[in-house]
Amino acid sequence: MQHRIICLVLLYYILFISTHILFVHANFPFFGYGVQSRTRQYHRLPLGLDAFGPEAIAFDCNDEGPYVGVSDGRILKWEGTSWNLFAVTSSNRSNTCDGTNSTPVEQKCGRPLGLKFNMKTCELYIVDSSYGLVKVGRDGGVATSLATGVQGIPFMFLNDLDIDSESGAIYFTDTSSTYHRWEYLESIATFEQSGRLIKYDMNTKALTVLLRDLYFANGVALSKNKDFILVAETSAFRVIRYWLNGPKLGTSEVFLKVDGLPDNINTNSKGDFWIAKVPTKPIKVDEYGNILETLDTFHITDSSDVFEFQGNLWIGAVDQPYVIYTT
């Protein structure tokens, strides 16, 4: 307990420094980029079902949803009038898991974090912090395990993913090989550096480590042209770009430094990126890292995911019992 308190104090100090110093750092392009948010109406959609913490949001190949993964191991689907159980990430899960949040029981119950549909097959791919990379068929149910470790290191804290449905490549982040998900505060506050970006080939089942030694590897998003992928390094307050094609193939660079802790990243239909952050507000940036919009509204107290669907935003938060959406 004493160790956790120390880590919390360190984390709050880090956040204070980041919001007062990094914001005005010369390398931060926060001025002159038209960052004012457009007019949006914000609404809350409660989860119910004793559910909490919709970390990520997804829509399926038929534009149905949203789907969310919650803290007790369930994946829920919005059916237009209510949330219903769609899937679980392990057959080990039981109803006694319902309502649990951020505790070691995640090792039994599971904790689905990143969600993405393969738009060719309508299968849902999930990174579960305890059970690794899994997938669920279009009708839901119990997930099938695809990978639980790589290069002799078991997955302890998978976090987010993106899919290239054309090539069959899945890119996902392994946040830490030292800390479990429920120990995320320690991982951030101690600047632990064992995160990885990993590629899974659906066709060959091969796993390849693309980047290692990352600071709390978190959100991941492919560019519209699939020539690079973005990876959030949460405890380093930055987003990394890893090149998948072109003259910089296989190299990485700092794409953007941010004021706050970056979380999930999503690409919209125009090729822009939504970056969720805490404690500061989510931002939309273009492929060059220019900030196009900031969701500077009191309606958002924290965010782990911003997903743009048919012109509206769906916002998840790991610490809330609801999803926010805009009209």
Image: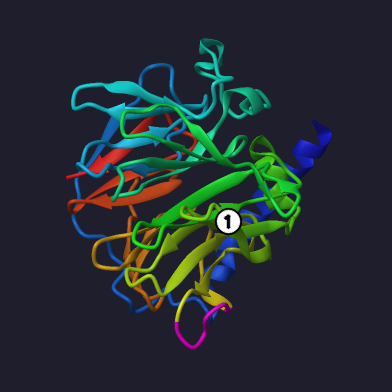
Which residue is the extreme one toward the bottom? Answer: 247
Q: At 63% across and 23% down in the image, what residue appears? A: 108
Residue 175, given in percent of the width and then of the height, sits at 63, 51
Tell me where residue 102 sits by quadrant.
Answer: top right
Residue 311, given in percent of the width and then of the height, sits at 18, 54
Which residue is the extreme one toward the top? Answer: 96
Height in image: 33 above or below 88?
below
Which residue is the extreme one toward the front? Answer: 204
Height in image: 109 above or below 3?
above
Residue 250 falls inside the magenta stretch: yes
Height in image: 181 above or below 205?
above
Q: Secondary structure at mark 1?
A: loop
Q: Please name the amino acid that badge 1 sits on.
A: Ala
Q: At 41% across and 55% down in the image, what residue appears? A: 163
> Label 1 neighbourhood size at 10 Å, few (<14), some (14-19), many (20+)?
few
Which region of the structure is painted magenta? 246-251
What is the chief secondary structure element of the magenta stretch?
A: loop
Residue 131, given in percent of the width and then of the height, sits at 60, 35
Number of on-image labels: 1
Residue closest to the eye, 160 or 205: 205
Residue closest to the eye, 213 or 183: 213
Q: At 80% across and 30% down in the image, what residue appears? A: 1
Residue 138 falls inside the magenta stretch: no
Q: Which residue is mark 1?
A: 206
Residue 197, given in percent of the width and then of the height, sits at 59, 60
Q: Is residue 257 left or right of residue 123?
A: right
Q: Is residue 32 left or right of residue 177?
A: left
Q: Is residue 272 left or right of residue 305?
A: left
Height in image: 306 above or below 144?
below
Residue closest to the eye, 192 or 91: 91
